[in-house]
Amino acid sequence: MKTKIDNILEKILVSLMVILVLDVLWQVISRYVNKFMAAIEMQIPTKLYAFTDELAGFLLVWVALLGGAYATGKKQHLAIELLATKLSDKNNKKLNLLINFMIFVFSVGALIIGGGWLVYTRFYLGQVSAAMELPIGIVYLVLPISGMIISYYVIEEFVSLVKSLKAA
């Protein structure tokens, strides 16, 4: 199951990054084109700039949060290992249990519950983005999604650590 989630996340992240790069590239090119057009007294509508700028911001949020979930699953998230290097193997596993528990509490509390509430209120209030006129709830939907993915990865790691501690 973990491999399947990893593969899906990889494909989503690559797709979002490709769209993000193309979007930003279009922003840069169109600004130079607009400078040229201004020189000949023509102009590209500014709504097009706002659209691409807003899309880049939304994509960046999705890439960051889904990328964080992916990094958690690959155990490549940011860590300070000063204490872990000084502990025995058994105590290191206990420390990892504590760390995974704290990550789980954060992902459930902040991302799933808090993010879910944010998504619900944005849809309930009917907020839409200025340029794209996209419901803001869709943008924030990545919070509970990434929270669920992180929670899954952490639970899986927690179970693995408990089994290895019982076996020792």
Image: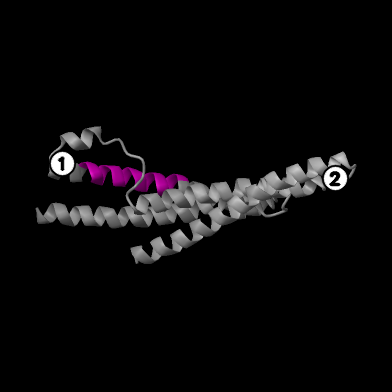
Q: Is residue 34 left or right of residue 103?
A: right
Which residue is label 2 attached to? 43
Q: Which mark is residue 91?
A: 1
Q: Is residue 98 left or right of residue 148?
A: left
How many other residues sit within 10 Å of disc 2, few (<14), some (14-19) or many (≥20)?
Answer: few
Q: Which residues are magenta?
A: 95-110
- In percent of width and height, residue 18 lies at 56, 56
- Identified at 76% across, 49% down, the residue is 48
Secondary structure character of the magenta stretch overall: helix
Q: Quick check: marks 2 and 1 in contact, CB under 8 Å?
A: no
* Pair 2/1: label in front: 2
Q: Which mark is residue 150?
A: none
Q: Does the stretch in magenta take in 102?
A: yes
- Identified at 36% across, 57% down, the residue is 152
Q: Amino acid at mark 2?
A: Gln
Farthest residue toward the right? 41
Tell me the quarter of the image containing the N terminus: bottom left
The residue tagged with tag 2: helix, strand or loop?
Answer: loop
- Identified at 30% across, 35% down, the residue is 80
- In percent of width and height, residue 68 lies at 43, 48
Seen from the viewer's position, the closer of residues 161 and 72 is: 72
Q: Is residue 104 left or right of residue 96?
A: right
Cα separation, mark 2 vs mark 1, equals 65 Å
Seen from the viewer's position, the closer of residues 30 and 66 is: 30
Badge count: 2
Q: Does the stretch in magenta take in 117?
A: no
Q: Amino acid at mark 1?
A: Asn
- In percent of width and height, residue 21 lies at 59, 51
How many other residues sit within 10 Å of disc 1, few (<14), some (14-19) or many (≥20)?
Answer: few
